[in-house]
Image (tube, rainbow, N blue to C red):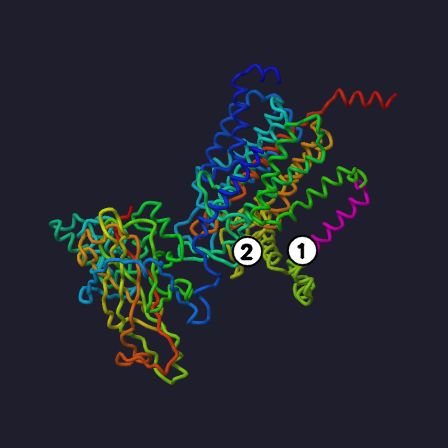
């Protein structure tokens, strides 16, 4: 198969273009993003015949299970009311006003991206390090441009310099310390500094891979990772977004555990039992509080600590969203931002946001995709022949993004009220989510080094 | 060494230019505190007070129209826009026509004049709330009119945008939506120059710090105010710096009226009053006033010096419908 692809100019060009498309998606061209999704689907259609035989085999071996949830999720986004518009739209409603054709392209594009990841992985035309660095560079470039624009417009350390000062726009006042200049498509727009800091912290986490590089071996990887993570670090420093560094913690812990070989020690039944017990306990507390069994909501409110832990503003939103979805009152998405006068959207957590705007069906599909992806990721981490540095880079970036968006998503990315429809941007338009889908397809293909394995077996036998 | 120089150069360039978005900043919460006397916006560009502008004053009290936000804007604005061909009949029907207006069919009339008459009657009908000043402002403010993106953007930036956002009355957000000015007034320099103009519209009302209840007095809801609006033209190779001030008396300006709709909308034909060329190249504005009479604070035009309470002019909107800028 590999020979067949290498012999075909069409396949080679298409694979190269596919990587370009992924780069452009990572670069985030804002409202022209659907163009790249359409291209992703087109390239998938061109490449599919070359991988037809392998696909037939792999569909039965797990690719189908990875593909179906994302297809279902994308199907929900096609019909969920929040993605469309309505003749009478009010400010307390989410309407992303995406035309049907855009939603259809989203659907085709996301499926196409997953398959492109699979095709590129299967073809082995590109080295993994090149693919990862292209994606990371794509994510870092808008951060760098936004950093320059922010420095030009606000100067260095502006949250400290302009603390408690405001500017006015369209009659409303906005705090300078929370503003940044963000690249959106080909425009620089005033946005939330936290959105810039989030992207900065995500690309910074790629730098943890440097803990595992061999200085003599791979200068390209070292230089690329240094530059990419430096863009993130400098953005965080120059915009005085030091608080965002906290989101590096999970990736840092993971990298350190791996570096000092502690991960293997933690891989035992006791650790697994503790994790399952904690997750189970959390789920039970969540369920009991959501349905107010044993009058738990009142109980939590009697104590300041328990109130902040289990009955804060975010948790109250989560309870409502959960009950609406699992009470089967919200099957394929809601467009209201409030329930009985209580604000529920944005919830601050990307999974609960999905549960609200995509309903129970959309959420289950999305969750199933993430579960399948994590399973494949673990397999990739344990079995693929790729260098450890690349695996750490990938997992660090994904872990940081997941941790960040579990705690605050979506942002009010663009500050001014007139951009509210862009701000309610769906997960399906998020460059990070789209490259994650691509990566899911890519890591599905395990490049096992059979020779090394065989040698190891022989040594063991001796 | 060379690299260090480049980095130093980059940092110094960014430091020097790092102010574009923060040229006009204010303390958070300024102008909307609980203390009336702290809410004045008093900024006037220094040169408007110190430089030598050649001033011409135009007294136009007899040429102004005064309306309220819910009044029909047809007679004092929309008709003018139609006559001056700034607005087509189709656009007028689309923007300001009620369901009845839109139902009027040309083929039902014997000739164009009768059809136009029917449309005009429908547009100017008191029942047609689509032609209210509120709707007129929503379509003709300086950020939503037929201006280029750059011009709209320039009027969106800065505190002056409170007067260009199309909100011509109190919207429930109190001082946040308006600009409270003292008799010394406020001034603003624009990023662009005015090239052509038609009408000028000012939406404002009076406001005081008087607690009428504590005096056992009825609320005073009208005030006689003299308003001065100065337009500034900077010195050029062909002209000296000039200032054209239109001044007019509003005999019964709404003041302290509890009903949020009671705002005075003052409009006049700027082109007719000053001529089509006079204000060409204007890039600045100053609005000041003089309280002439207030039944409580200045009864019969004599200031009651025993009182500490203050009168302020609350500005909501400045409009120059169908003006052009460069």
SS type, badge 2:
loop
Give the class, few, some or many, for how many residues have Cα within 10 Å of label 2's Cα (few <14, many ≥20): many
Quick check: B13 above or below B198?
above
Residue A13 % position (x, y): 52, 21
Q: Nearer the viewer, mark 1 or mark 2?
A: 2
**Against B272, is A265 above or below?**
above
Quarter that holds the N terminus of chain A: top right
Q: Between B277 and B201, which is closer to the camera in this rendering?
A: B277
Q: Which residues are magenta?
A: A266-286
Q: Marks 1 and 2: CB-CB under 8 Å?
A: no
The quarter of the rendered structure image containing the C terminus of chain A is top right
Report the residue marked by disc 2. A344
Residue A229 vs B129, above or below: the answer is above
Left of B70 or right of it: where is A318?
A: right
Q: What is the chain letter for disc 1? A: A
Quarter of the image for residue A291 reads bottom right
Which of the numbered marks, if any, corresponds to residue A287? Answer: 1
Parent chain of label 2: A
Q: In the rendered image, which quarter is residue B309 located in? A: bottom left
């Amino acid at each position: 198969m590999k020979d067949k692809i290498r012999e075909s100019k069409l396949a080679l060009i298409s694979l190269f273009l596919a990587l370009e498309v992924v780069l452009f998606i990572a670069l985030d061209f804002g409202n022209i993003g659907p163009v790249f999704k359409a291209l992703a689907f087109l390239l998938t259609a061109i490449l599919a015949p070359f991988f037809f035989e392998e696909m037939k085999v792999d569909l039965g071996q797990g690719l189908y299970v990875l593909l179906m949830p994302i297809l279902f999720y994308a199907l929900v986004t096609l019909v969920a009311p929040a993605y469309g518009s309505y003749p009478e739209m009010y400010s307390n409603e989410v309407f992303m006003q995406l035309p049907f054709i855009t939603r259809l392209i989203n659907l085709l594009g996301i499926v196409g991206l997953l398959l492109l990841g699979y095709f590129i992985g299967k073809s082995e035309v590109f080295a993994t390090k090149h693919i990862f660095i292209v994606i990371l560079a794509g994510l870092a470039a808008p951060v760098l441009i936004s950093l320059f624009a922010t420095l030009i417009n606000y100067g260095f350390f502006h949250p400290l310099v302009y603390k408690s000062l405001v500017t006015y726009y369209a009659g409303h006042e906005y705090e300078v310390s929370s503003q940044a200049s963000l690249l959106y498509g080909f425009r620089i727009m005033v946005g939330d500094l936290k959105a810039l800091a989030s992207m900065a912290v995500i690309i910074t986490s790629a730098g943890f891979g440097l803990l595992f590089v061999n200085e003599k071996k791979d200068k390209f990887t070292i230089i690329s990772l240094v530059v990419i993570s430096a863009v993130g670090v400098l953005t965080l420093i120059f915009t005085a977004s030091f608080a965002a560094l906290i989101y590096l913690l999970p990736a840092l812990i993971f990298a350190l555990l791996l570096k000092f070989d502690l991960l293997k020690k933690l891989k035992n039944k006791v650790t697994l039992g503790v994790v399952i017990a904690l997750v189970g306990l959390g789920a039970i507390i969540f369920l009991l509080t959501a349905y107010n069994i044993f009058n738990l909501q009142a109980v939590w409110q009697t104590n300041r600590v328990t109130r902040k832990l289990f009955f804060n503003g975010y948790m109250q939103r989560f309870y409502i969203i959960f009950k609406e979805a699992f009470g089967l009152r919200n099957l394929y998405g809601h467009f209201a931002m409030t329930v009985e006068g209580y604000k529920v959207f944005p919830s601050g957590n990307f999974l609960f946001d999905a549960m609200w705007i995509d309903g129970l069906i959309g959420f289950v599909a999305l969750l199933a995709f993430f579960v399948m992806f994590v399973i494949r990721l673990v397999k990739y981490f344990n079995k693929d022949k790729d260098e450890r540095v690349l695996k750490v880079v990938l997992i660090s970036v994904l872990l940081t993004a997941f941790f960040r968006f579990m705690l605050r998503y979506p942002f009010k990315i663009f500050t001014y009220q007139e951009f509210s429809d862009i701000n309610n941007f769906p997960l399906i338009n998020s460059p990070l989510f789209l490259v994650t889908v691509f990566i899911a397809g890519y890591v599905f293909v395990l490049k096992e080094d059979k020779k090394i394995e065989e040698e190891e077996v022989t040594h063991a036998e001796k | 060494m060379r690299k260090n120089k480049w980095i130093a150069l980059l940092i110094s360039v960014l430091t020097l230019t790092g102010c574009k978005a923060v040229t006009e900043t204010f303390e958070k919460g300024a102008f909307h505190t609980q203390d009336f006397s702290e809410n004045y916006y008093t900024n006037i560009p220094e040169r408007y007070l110190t430089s030598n502008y050649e001033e011409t004053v135009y007294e136009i009290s007899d040429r102004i129209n005064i309306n309220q936000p819910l009044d029909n804007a047809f007679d004092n604005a929309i008709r003018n826009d139609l006559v001056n061909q700034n607005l087509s009949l189709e656009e007028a029907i689309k923007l300001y026509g009620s369901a009845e207006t839109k139902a009027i069919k040309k083929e039902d009339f014997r000739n164009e004049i009768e059809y136009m008459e029917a449309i005009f009657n429908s547009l100017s009908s008191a029942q047609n709330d689509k032609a209210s000043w509120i709707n007129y402002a929503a379509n003709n403010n300086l950020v939503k009119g037929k201006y280029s993106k750059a011009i709209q953007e320039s009027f969106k930036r800065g505190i002056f945008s409170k007067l260009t956002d199309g909100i011509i009355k109190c919207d429930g957000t109190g001082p946040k939506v308006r600009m409270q000015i003292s008799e010394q007034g406020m001034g603003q320099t624009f990023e662009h120059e005015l090239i052509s103009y038609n009408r000028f519209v000012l939406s404002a009302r009076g406001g005081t710090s008087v607690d009428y209840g504590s005096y056992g007095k009825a609320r005073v809801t009208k005030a006689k105010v003299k308003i001065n609006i100065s337009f500034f033209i900077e010195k050029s190779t062909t002209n000296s710096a000039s200032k054209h001030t239109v001044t007019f008396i509003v005999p019964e300006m709404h003041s302290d009226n509890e009903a949020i709709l009671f705002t005075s909308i003052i409009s006049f034909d700027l082109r007719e009053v000053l001529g089509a060329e006079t204000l060409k190249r204007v890039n600045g504005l100053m609005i000041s006033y003089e309280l002439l009479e207030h039944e409580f604070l200045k009864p019969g035009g004599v200031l009651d010096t025993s009182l500490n309470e203050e009168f302020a002019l609350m500005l909501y909107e400045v409009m120059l419908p169908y003006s052009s800028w460069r």
